[in-house]
Amino acid sequence: YELGSWFPVAFSAGAGFIAVSSLINSRIVHRIGMRRLSHTALTGFMVEGRYRGPDGARLTTTVIADSPLAQMLSMQVSNPQFRGENTEVVAYESYEGLLTRNGEDRLQLLVLMGPHTVQVDARGVPQDRLLALFSESALGAVEAAVSR
């Protein structure tokens, strides 16, 4: 940093700013609550849609913009050792994702779209129907929304 004898002063000033911001953060969390604070912070990054079919099938689609999950999911897609037993890699056009079976009638689909993550939770929807629905309808709409 070429600060010479001023380096200890600059270093301690940085530590002081970190201590003050930590104190302010703890007071905000104490006053507002961690759950409310984190949900409010995610409001600008996440959109969710729900669908309930006449046959009882349920789909919940969540799009998370600039998601830190994208890096973790890319590791799971590329390395089988990071995947669970009931998880398989699926591909949609130029995108890759993970399909996980959670029980008999529950599926979770996570698709990476650049820095964005799309999560689809499905209950009562067979795997082939979920993949077809996502490919035919949701993929185009989500792709258009995240490319803006």
Image: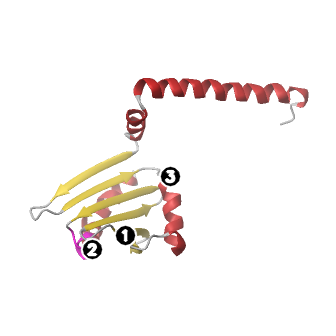
- Residue under pointer 3: 68
Magenta range is 125-130
Q: Mark 2 or mark 1, which is nearer the start of the sequence? A: 1
Q: Secondary structure at mark 1?
A: strand
Q: Amino acid at mark 1?
A: Leu
The answer to whether any part of residue 79 appears in the image is no
Circles 1, 2 touching at the beta carbon (< 8 Å): yes
Label 2 and label 3: CA atoms lie apart by 27 Å
Label 1 and label 3: CA atoms lie apart by 19 Å
Q: Is residue 75 left or right of residue 120?
A: right
Q: Mark 3 or mark 1, which is nearer the start of the sequence? A: 3
Q: Residues within 10 Å of mark 2 (few under 14, many from 20)?
A: some
Please determine whether, in this image, residue 133 is positioned above or below residue 42. below
Q: Amino acid at mark 3?
A: Pro
- Residue under pointer 2: 127
Circles 2, 3 touching at the beta carbon (< 8 Å): no
